[in-house]
Amino acid sequence: MSISMRERTDGAVGRAGAPSPAEADRQPLRPAISRAADLARAGENRACAKQHAKGKKTARERLDLLFDPGSFRETGRFIGADINNDRSGCAVVTGMGQVRGRTVAAYAQDFSIRGGTLGAVEGDKILRLMDEAMRIGAPIVALLDSGGARIQEGVAALSRYGGIFRATCRASGTVPQISIILGPCAGGAVYCPALTDLIIMTRENSHMFVTGPDVVREATGETIGMDELGGGLLHGTVSGVAHYLAQDETDAIDYARVVLSYLPSNCMEQAPRYDYVATRADRRTADALSSIVPERDREPYDMREVIGLIVDYGEFVQVHEMYAGSALTGFACIDGRSVGIVANQPSVMGGVLDVESSEKIARFVRLCDAFNLPVVTLVDTPGYRPGSDQERAGIIRRGAKVIYAYAEAQVPLVTVVLRKAFGGAYIVMGSRSIGADEVFAWPTSRIAVLGAKGAVDIIHRRDLITAREGGGGRRGSSPDVGGRLREPCGQREPGSGDGTDRRDDRSRADP
């Protein structure tokens, strides 16, 4: 009993007087921690000064915009730090937080530290985050602003890019991956975002290219600026690399948040569902569908108006909005459930399918299939775009991607033919024969191998030739789809040649 009392007394004396051995061991760390905190604050202040002068935000400011307020938890804050030499960390910030209440992993490259270049420390830090995201099934968002691989580290830096490529491929189709380009992204680094599901760029400051302007000039003699070579406008409208062209950084990050709200956290979860109750006003709005689609094949209309009357609250989040305008793709909700929308756009080249729109549709359908989003397809197309340029661009190879995407899809497929669906385009645009679960047709819709005019030209070709040779006048006339009489076959139009093999110009896009 006396021994126990002595132990208690010694312990009390130890706490009241000199620190215990354990406390003494921890005591020297406190100045270092304080020093690290000071370095961190100073580093963030320097980053603000550098980035704000360029009209850009810092890595941590961008992450604060992405995540719900107060939810971001940074990991590995001082990895790569050297307190004694006033270095507070490496050139990438990693962590997890909540986006609309769901866990998301993200990393942001810090251009204020060594130009945001990637070395061994940065690569390992990103790989650890990606591994953890895969383990818990969380989406991955990358905010990229970097000078590329760190030259001083040589192959070590390149090998980390290889590891990130491999990890991105393993995560593909398992968790959603979004890349936001907020600065330069050049060389081999461009393939990191190219492997992800969506790429978002801004009109200013965002640049992506395999070789920069200086290398292009040295290799080819061509003088070209960064915007013309790989700016956001180029990739959003011409190359199709960017799925969304944002006005600024805030817009880009907000778009990423919106897209994540339509996608599940991983491939094992169902698409998100939201509360929705149709009102009387919604039903009146839906009634307008009966008059919005013109009966005449050549009369244009905006398919976005049709989509706005079908989906909840008229909200349609487009993907690839500025690229391949003859097709529309994007996310929406129907009766509170997230769906993918695919549609032809009659107001752009008549809604024709070409190499760009085919790849656009195929990629989007596969994205929806990977993450359990039903696909609603609205069809109004005259067919594939004819021409030697399309054949040379690989319309056969690239058009086949649409077939594969729909045929392989395991999600519910619902198709509506609004006005016309001719030839091979009818088959590939989610037809019943290719795997659609439900196919509906507008009361005035037309489904055929060819339009009426083209069919007459082929089926009655001999009669038309005979009438032309004999000057048959109206005897050679054939009714147009709209009920009008065509020019008599004996009267040649300028540039029509001998007129013996005129094809249906309705199967071509309107200029």
Image: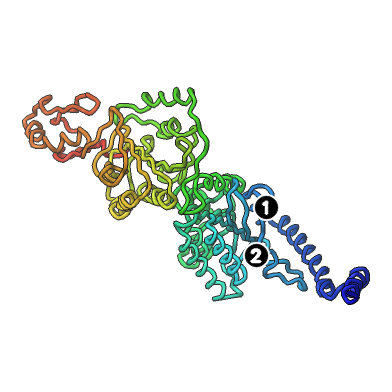
Mark 2 residue type: Ala
- What kind of element bears circle 1? helix
* Left or right: residue 359 compared with residue 52: left
| Residue designated by label 2 | 91
Asked if one can make out residue 472 in the rendered structure from this viewpoint, the answer is: yes
Disc nearer the start of the sequence (2/1): 1
Q: Nearer the viewer, residue 222 or 315?
A: 315
In x, y percent, where is residue 146?
A: 59, 62
For label 1, the crowd category at 10 Å Cα-Cα, with few meaning under 14, some 14 to 19 and many 20 or more, is: few
Asked if one can make out residue 212 in the rendered structure from this viewpoint, the answer is: no
| Residue designated by label 1 | 61
* Left or right: residue 177 compared with residue 108: left
Count of marks placed on residues: 2
Q: Dividing the picture into quarters, in which one does residue 207 lie?
A: bottom right
Q: Is residue 250 above or below residue 226?
A: above
User: At 9% across and 35% down in the image, what residue appears?
Assistant: 465
Q: Nearer the viewer, residue 400 or 20?
A: 20
CA gap between label 2 and label 1 equals 15 Å
- What kind of element bears circle 2? loop
* Left or right: residue 66 compared with residue 315: right
* Left or right: residue 399 compared with residue 375: left
Q: Is residue 71 above or below residue 419?
A: below
In x, y percent, where is residue 276?
A: 51, 33
User: At 60% across and 70% down in the image, what residue appears?
Assistant: 119
In x, y percent, where is residue 323?
A: 43, 46
Mark 1 residue type: Glu
